[in-house]
Image (spheres, helix red, strand yellow):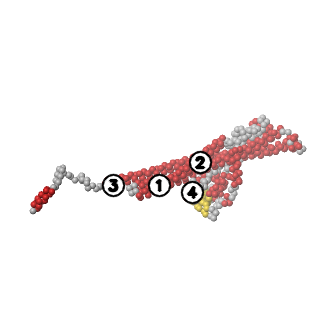
């Protein structure tokens, strides 16, 4: 080091990710990952400005201990799939204490660290939960895929076929995301999960409740205590909060729609039989009533399928990404905790170096050692030696902490990029399927009503035609218009009288005689 003026630190203004104020030194910024040699003593020099003696301890350290592992994602990201996992065959188990479901997990692999090429085990939900907790504990800076929730929207029986089908698909997606991850797929806990016949002994080694609470408290404290969060991660945090809020709104609206659709389906189920019963008492309206009943029944069946798809196809991905947002927030908190540890270590180093500078100018004649009869210079030298040892140890801790921050940033960036890529594909797919299902549902309803209307119109036309073809009977007082009538009106008969009657009778008698 040339002198104290070249140091990255001045008194009270440390640089690097852990600095309490001032800009971050480019050499120590965890966002600028490099494999070059970094002289932390020079970067963390706390000497007084212009004092060439402040840089008297040349301790050169290298931040390469963990950087080699940062290239792991790039080396393994060649999309070489040599591990395949399938979740299927849910099976119910009944014991004296509980009833639960296990799933068959079949693994096929060509990796050399597996003793066999194929494994078949049975796992329950608690085993999947154990796996996720272990992955999170051993890979705190990686984004661990979330597990599905325990209950569905309509609180289906957890042993019902619909619930088991949805749960199986969610567990399959959970394991698929893990085995496709370039780092998580090599985790030893995943190997145990896929190969061990029983997990009871391994599950006992899981982190206790106090350990979980401690980790949670440290993560929460990191968000409040950290003084120098990078704008990049502040923007990332804001995006995750906004994304989670939007997906939560979509989920709430979807649940309201499901409730309204369920109520509407119940109304249609009660509506159809009304027309059928009505047709029994109205003979003339029976064809129209039966057509209406058939149309309502078809719409009810289409709506039932739409509700099932809405709940078991659309809702799970939405809920998954809500949980993904929560998982991302947890990773950001753990990353902040690592950076906070770095900052606290740098602050402690700054304080020790300040103490060393003040020791040069302090009078040790009134120190405790001098009162006990020691020479003031000897006391000064002892304190200087102790501070030098502490500074050297803190420099090593800063190196390790700096590496941890760099690894955390690299892991988080790689996982975030992978997450964005999967998110774009999944969101596009789920909303496209939603559009297609709605189009199909309304087409089925439209087709049902068009068929109903066509049947009603056809039956009405047949009834009208049959009515016109039936002959009608003539009234007695109505003359038959088809019978020809004479054009001459016949004379009216004369009114008979007594004399005429008698004369007519005598004449008639004479004629008879």
Label 4 crowd bin: few (<14), some (14–19), many (20+), radius 10 Å: few
Which mark lies nearer to you, 2 or 3? 3
Q: In front here: 488 or 158?
A: 488
Q: Judge the density around disc 1: few (<14), some (14-19), many (≥20) Cα neighbours within 10 Å.
A: some
Q: Is residue 411 visible?
A: no
Q: Secondary structure at mark 3?
A: helix
Q: CA distance from mark 4 to mark 3?
A: 54 Å
Residue at 24 percent across and 53 percent down: it is 479
**Quadrant of the snapshot with the N terminus:** top right
Q: Residue at x 83, y 43 (%)?
A: 383
- What residue is disc 3 on? 466
Side (left or right) of 11 relative to 91: right
Q: Residue furthest top?
A: 50
Which percent across, then down, holds residue 501? 14, 57
- Secondary structure at badge 1 equals helix
Q: Position of residue 290 (x, y in %)?
A: 42, 56
Cα separation, mark 1 vs mark 2, equals 34 Å
Q: Secondary structure at mark 4?
A: loop
Given the current orientation, which residue lies at the most extreme bottom position?
A: 96
Q: Of all residues shown, which one is farthest toward the front?
A: 498
Quadrant of the rendered image containing residue 42 = top right
Relative placement, left or right, of 293 versus 187 is left
CA distance for labels 2 and 3:
62 Å
Does dot 2 land on a helix, a strand or a loop? helix
The residue nearer to you, when weighing 471 against 114, is 471
Q: Which residue is mark 1?
A: 271
For the C terminus, the image quarter is bottom left
Q: Earlier in the sequence, mark 3 or mark 1?
A: 1
Gap in angstroms between the C-alphas marked 3 and 1: 32 Å
* Mark closer to the chain start, 2 or 4: 4
Q: Which residue is mark 2?
A: 248
Give the label, 1 or 2, closer to the camera: 1
């Amino acid at each position: 080091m040339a002198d104290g003026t070249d140091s990255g630190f001045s008194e009270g203004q440390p640089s690097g990710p852990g600095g309490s104020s001032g800009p971050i030194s480019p050499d120590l910024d965890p966002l600028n990952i490099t494999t070059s040699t970094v002289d932390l003593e020079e970067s963390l020099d706390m000497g007084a400005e212009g004092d060439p003696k402040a840089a008297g301890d040349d301790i050169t350290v290298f931040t390469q201990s963990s950087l080699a592992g940062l290239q792991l994602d790039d080396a393994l990201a060649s999309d070489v799939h040599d591990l395949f996992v399938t979740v299927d065959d849910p099976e119910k188990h009944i014991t004296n204490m509980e009833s639960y479901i296990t799933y068959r997990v079949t693994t096929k692999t060509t990796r050399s660290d597996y003793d066999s090429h194929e494994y078949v085990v049975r796992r329950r939900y608690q085993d999947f939960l154990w796996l996720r907790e272990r992955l999170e504990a051993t890979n705190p800076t990686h984004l661990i895929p979330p597990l599905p929730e325990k209950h569905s929207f309509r609180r289906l029986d957890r042993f019902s076929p619909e619930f088991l089908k949805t749960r199986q698909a969610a567990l399959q997606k959970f394991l698929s995301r893990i085995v496709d991850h370039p780092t998580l797929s090599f985790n030893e806990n995943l190997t145990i999960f896929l190969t061990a016949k029983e997990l009871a002994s391994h599950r006992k080694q899981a982190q206790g409740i106090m350990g979980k609470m401690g980790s949670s408290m440290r993560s929460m404290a990191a968000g409040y205590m950290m003084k120098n969060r990078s704008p990049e991660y502040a923007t990332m945090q804001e995006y995750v909060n906004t994304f989670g809020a939007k997906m939560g709104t979509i989920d709430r609206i979807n649940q309201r729609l499901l409730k309204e659709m369920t109520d509407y389906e119940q109304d249609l189920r009660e509506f159809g039989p009304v027309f059928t019963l009505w047709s029994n008492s109205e003979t003339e309206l029976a064809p129209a009533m039966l057509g209406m009943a058939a149309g309502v029944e078809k719409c009810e069946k289409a709506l039932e399928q739409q509700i099932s798809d809405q709940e078991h196809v659309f809702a799970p991905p939405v809920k998954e990404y809500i949980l993904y947002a929560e998982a991302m927030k947890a990773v950001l908190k753990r990353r902040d905790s690592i950076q906070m540890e770095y900052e606290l270590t740098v602050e402690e180093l700054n304080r020790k170096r300040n103490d060393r500078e003040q020791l040069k100018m302090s009078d040790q004649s009134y120190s405790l050692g001098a009162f006990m009869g020691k020479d003031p210079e000897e006391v000064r030298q002892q304190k200087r030696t102790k501070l030098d040892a502490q500074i050297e140890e803190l420099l090593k801790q800063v190196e390790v902490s700096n590496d941890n921050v760099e690894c955390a940033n690299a892991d988080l960036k790689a996982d975030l990029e992978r997450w964005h890529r999967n998110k774009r594909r999944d969101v596009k797919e789920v909303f496209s399927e939603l559009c297609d299902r709605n189009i199909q549902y309304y087409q089925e309803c439209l087709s049902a009503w068009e068929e109903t209307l066509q049947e009603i119109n056809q039956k009405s036309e047949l009834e009208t035609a049959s009515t016109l073809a039936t002959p009608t009977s003539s009234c007695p007082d109505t003359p038959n218009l088809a019978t020809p009538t004479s054009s001459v009106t016949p004379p009216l008969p004369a009114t008979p009288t007594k004399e005429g009657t008698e004369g007519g009778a005598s004449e008639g008698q004479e004629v008879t005689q």
